[in-house]
Amino acid sequence: MEIVLLIVSCFFLVGFTFAVLGGLFLGFLLGLWYAVSYYDSAERTGIRRWPWLQNCRVWNFVRTYFHIKLDFSALEGNTFSDGRGYLFPARPHGLCCLSIIFGISANVGTLPSSHLPKVPFIGASSWVFRTPFFRDLILWGGGIDVKRETLKAKLQEKESVFILPGGVDEMTLSSRTSLEFSFKHDGFLRLVKEADALLVPVFCKGENRIFATWNILRALRLRFTKLFGYPLPTFFFGPYPEPLTIQFGAPIDPRDHESIGSLKEAYWKAMFELIGEKEMLGPETRAYKEKI
């Protein structure tokens, strides 16, 4: 009996050892394969875009919850052609930029071809592409690195690209009670001049009201933003079923503006026209509107 138990125990130990070693080896192979996938430059080329995921019907429930719709009425009869690249700087960033994720990236199958002749790419922060698995979701959704050289290459290839120039600064300013913008970043204006692309203002109405943020420890959050690129700690409640409307302005041609200052003024004037008078503006944004 003892011999039988000894044999069974040996078989069990050997089997367990092989299972563990086999699992470790398989895990090593998968890890190696995944690590190699970091070096295919997908975040610069957008080659991993997955149309099936972007057009998956499950996103319809999300769009219904937020009542997402696209508004092209401000185009004033203008239509987009495929002869030049288009940069769509969207504001506000909000806490999670859900308007662009579910209204554009996960909605490419229903975008009107007369307004967007090419399936757009979505510019995302570089840290996103360093985060395992989250990186893949963004790549499948048409995400590309928001670095200057990547965006410039896409625009020179006459592609359409959405970006959120407000970044983490605008994320920190997000509030349900008022609309506040960050005016620090002008790089996208110089970019369209260099790439000879058209600039299309985009206002995501309702984006700032999806989440209620608790702005405690503001100084600490701003410090974390400077150090790590993300406003920690962030306390929020939501998401609320706030209607989201993505409003498109008329294209602005940088050839019509000799200086960046002139182009910037034209961009913000068009943006405030899209916003209208009904939105409650924060003090800094209201002061900037009055200045221009």
Image (cartoon, rainbow, N blue to C red):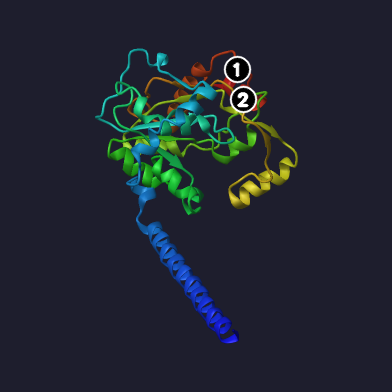
Q: Which mark is residue 179?
A: 2
Q: Which mark is residue 279?
A: 1
Q: Which residue is depicted at the point 54% across and 29% down?
A: 92
Q: Is residue 131 left or right of residue 290?
A: left
Q: Are marks 2 and 1 in contact (CB under 8 Å)?
A: yes
Q: Quadrant of the C terminus?
A: top right
Tell me residue 73's x, y (percent).
Answer: 41, 13
Tell me which amino acid carries mark 1.
Glu
Tell me residue 24's x, y (percent).
Answer: 48, 69
Which of these two is toward me, 273 or 2?
A: 2
Q: Secondary structure at mark 2?
A: loop
Question: How many residues crowd mark 2 within 10 Å: few (<14), some (14–19), many (20+)?
Answer: many
Residue furthest to the left in view is 83
Q: Which residue is depicted at the point 30% across and 19% down?
A: 79
Q: Is residue 141 left or right of residue 213?
A: left
Residue furthest to the front in view is 1
The number of numbered badges drawn on the structure is 2
Question: How many residues crowd mark 1 within 10 Å: few (<14), some (14–19), many (20+)?
Answer: few
CA gap between label 2 and label 1 equals 7 Å
Q: Quadrant of residue 112?
A: top left
Reply above or below: 136 against 244. below
Tell me which amino acid carries mark 2.
Leu
Which of these two is toward me, 136 or 117?
A: 136
Q: Is residue 61 visible?
A: yes
Q: Which residue is depicted at the point 35% across and 28% down?
A: 109
Q: Is residue 145 visible?
A: no
Q: Which mark is residue 51?
A: none
